[in-house]
Amino acid sequence: MLIAQISDTHILAPASDQPAAKLRADCLRRCVADINHQQPDAVIFTGDTVQHGQPGEYARLRELLAPLEAPLYLVPGNRDDKNEMRAAFSDHAHLPRSGDFLQYVIEEHAVRLVAIDSTSRGERKGVFCPARQTWLEKVLSDRPDQPTLLFIHHPPFDIDDHYVGGYRRPEEAVALADVVSRHPQVAGLTCGHVHWLIEREWAGTQARVMPSVAVDLRKGIDETEARGRPVYLLHRLSQATRLASLARRADAGG
Ligand SMILES: [Fe+2]
């Protein structure tokens, strides 16, 4: 199964006077076109979809995502407003209509996809409260033999000295690792938030963090080589490879 991941597009409203508005829209547009060319089975979007959580930004986001041919699954980031996101994507049947959390399970692919909501209104850091811990434990216990990919905005681990203590309470990040380590069918966990490309082992599985699609916000990319081209991730999951990920530059050809 081939899964494209996009993240941290930080889209601004077309009327915004910030110069990045056009640039960021263009980054997403180029990724969408390239993703269609790769024909993934699904696209996951790990949050910070827009900059200020405003309706005009979500309207712009919808326009830019409209050409995507594969099914799209979103989780919120700390920049998102869950109610505005729900309203903008009200036709996305998998998004819960009510409740505090925008998290869900997708069963219709070869790999089970589990979207975990790590956000809480007014909180920049990640949250994985006891209600979410109970939910994830139940979800993973329901189908212990089904290969599963988790996706979430906030990485639940420190990254050098750049991203430390990313969760509101350290014990909540530990709790997430504890739940996942009890379920070996989890093939990986993919995240955004840090705007940096990271691959590592975590909780007995593979973790990935992707650079921001917005090129003005990304870090750790050789800009001379990338020449301003936006980057997204392609994940291939199979029995043989488990999780193999490739950072793909949009418009790279081939
Ligand atoms: Fe972000």
Image (spheres, grey):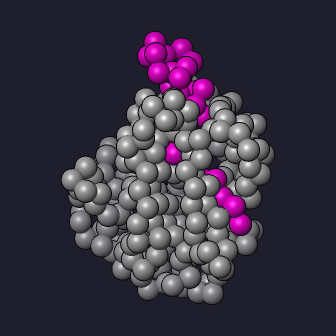
Quarter of the image with the N terminus is: bottom right
- Quick check: is 218 in the magenta stretch? no
- Magenta range: 1-28
**Up-down relation of residue 149 to residue 64 (above or below):** below
Identify the residue at image location x=43%, y=61%.
Answer: 199
State how many labels appear. 0
Provide residue 169's location: percent of width, then percent of height: 24, 63
Q: Residue at x 66, y 80 (%)?
A: 239
Q: Position of residue 111 (x, y in %)?
A: 67, 72
Residue 81 picture location, percent across and down: 47, 41
Seen in the picture, residue 216 relative to 74 is either above or below; the reply is: above
Above-or-below relation of 177 to 2: below
Q: Nearer the viewer, residue 23 or 48?
A: 23
Q: What residue lies at 61% left-to-right and 74% top-to-bottom?
A: 241
Q: Quadrant of the C terminus?
A: top right
Q: Please tell me which residue lies in front, 70 or 117.
A: 70
Query: Is residue 243 or residue 177 the one in the foreground?
Result: 243
Q: Position of residue 74 (x, y in %)?
A: 58, 51
- Is 187 placed left or right of 38 in the picture? left
State which quadrant residue 177 falls in: bottom left
Residue 22 on the magenta segment: yes
At x 42% / y 41%, what residue is drawn? 221
**Which residue in the rendered view is the most extreme toward the front?**
225
